[in-house]
Image (tube, helix red, strand yellow):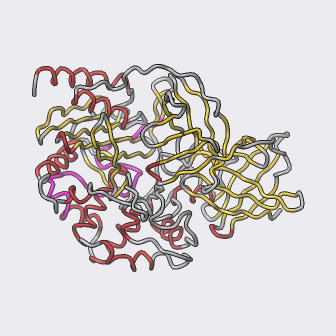
Amino acid sequence: MTAALSARLDRAVEALPRAYPGPGGAVAVLRAGEVLVRHAWGWANAERRIPFTPRTLFRICSITKQFTCALLLDAFPDPAVLDEEVRARLPHLAGPVPGALHLCHNQSGLRDYWAVAMLQGSPVEAPFADADAARLIGATRSLHFAPGTRSSYANQNFRILSDIIEARTGRSFAELLRTRIFARAGMASAFLAADTRAMPDGTEGYEGTQASGFRAAENRILWTGDAGIGASLDDLIAWERHIDATRDDPEALYSRLGAPVLFADGTPATYGFGLGRASEFGRAVTGHGGALRGWRSHRLHVASERLSVVVLFNHLADARAAALDLLAAALGVERSPDVPALPAPPWLGAYREPETRLLARIASAPGGQVELRFGQAPERLALRPDGSAANGTTLLRPTGDGLRMERRGENLSARLVPCSGSAAMDVTGRYRCDEIDSELDIVSAGGVLYGGFSGPLGRGRMELLEPIAADLWTLPCPRALDHTPPGDWTLAFERADGRVAGVAVGCWLARGLAYRRIG
């Protein structure tokens, strides 16, 4: 390692605890299999004063998905042999059924079960066990897009895969991971930490901020192939070294995980086999993040540079941003080069996207940017001299027939329809969706409208509705079972003879659900 590289990495690592404050963290940077950075700071458990070290066990959450797919490819080189097993787990699904590869690539069309759980009234800190998952998955009756045509994150894609692997091999998922993946990669302490309530070494995840204070997060989900692995920084260093050591073997697991993936129409996909595919600082990157309340992690791999970055936080700071800080330092590039700020465009406002029927809200943001609220979380797009705005995955572009939105990762391109009119207050009542056994209550409390869902998992809390346009409201879901909540539900009310008869409910994770008015 050169002196200049060492100095850049030292500065980047030293800045992390202040830039992303919280109880503790651990990071690693590797190049060509050599560990350039292996550093931890703070507390794995602040109350018990357990230090955070490179050997601390950590919930890597959705980083698990690539290991689930690695195990799948190791045990079943042609995943299509499992397609009938997927069909058997979706007995009530009408129409086309996704195959195993659709699940691996988040192209199944299944609505994410954590989002549907909130529609079924689950309280935020409620238990969610294997039986709950099986019931919710087995009750699926429709998809929100045809398999292979679009991409949408659905955690149960990977739970279904791990369940099938267990059933076909007759061995537990935990044992298979240990013997066929972890042992091969030298991940000595990695294990299946399915119960999210506690870690065996006492490591705790924390909610809150430096300003408001931190508190131990409460989680009671049982996870498997979607997000269940526990591992230390040293375990993930071993995984990155294994990737580098096998880089020239086209049949090596990571070579297969990172291979190009397509949609049904031949369009390249930006997600496949539990890995995101992106471009950072002009280089092709594969990687994934992980999150649960109290836990954030991210790993990046740049094959062309034989470079890997791992970040683990036991708090809710932005692990991806921290990983990009370290990657920029390792590459010797500017993290955020200065760009001229452009004035706010004339196309700010509220729109509907016709295919998903979801609301898209576009507002001005600092630094020559706009903020788009459409997907799971708000995203920033940089304004460009041609009048468009982009961030690498999403493009907003004014055209002669209106504003177009292109979302490359989802294979979605559409002309947005402007919203108009004022929302009326006559939408109070009870609504029911038979498909998912869910009810929505909208009530006026002192002249202000609130809404809440209920169903087999309980009664969700009432939230303040926000009026958007004629017969268009949003119902926020700022907290959920999983770390990242569904966000705002779009409520598009439908009328018959002038009276509200139903409402279409949806968010990016769970779209196109029809509720009829029952009271």
Residue 196, magenta (yes or no): yes
From the viewer's side, name the closer residue of 238 and 174.
238
The residue drawn where x is 19% and y is 57% is 182
Residue in the foreground of this view, choosing between 265 and 59? 265
The number of numbered discs placed on residues in the rendered structure image is 0
* Residue at x-position 27% and y-position 24%: 12
What x and y, as percent, mark residue 332?
23, 26
Tell me which segment is drawn in magenta: 180-207
Q: Quadrant of the N terminus?
A: top left
Q: Is residue 445 toward the left or the right of residue 34 in the image?
A: right
Q: Quadrant of residue 7?
A: top left
- In this rendering, position of residue 310 left or right of residue 23: left
Q: Position of residue 466 (x, y in %)?
A: 72, 41
The one of 297 and 43 positioned closer to us in this rendering: 297
User: Which quadrant holds residue 458?
Assistant: bottom right
Q: Which residue reaches farthest front?
A: 400
Instruction: Name the residue rendered at 55%, 45% in the picture.
Output: 405
Q: Is residue 462 magenta?
A: no
Give the x, y percent position of residue 87.
45, 77
Work out whether 46 lies above or below 211: below
Query: Residue 253: which quarter of the image?
Result: bottom left
- In the rendered structure, the answer to whether residue 455 lies left or right of residue 424 reads left
Query: Is residue 224 among what the camera can see?
Result: no
- Which residue is painted at 42% across and 39% down in the image? 392
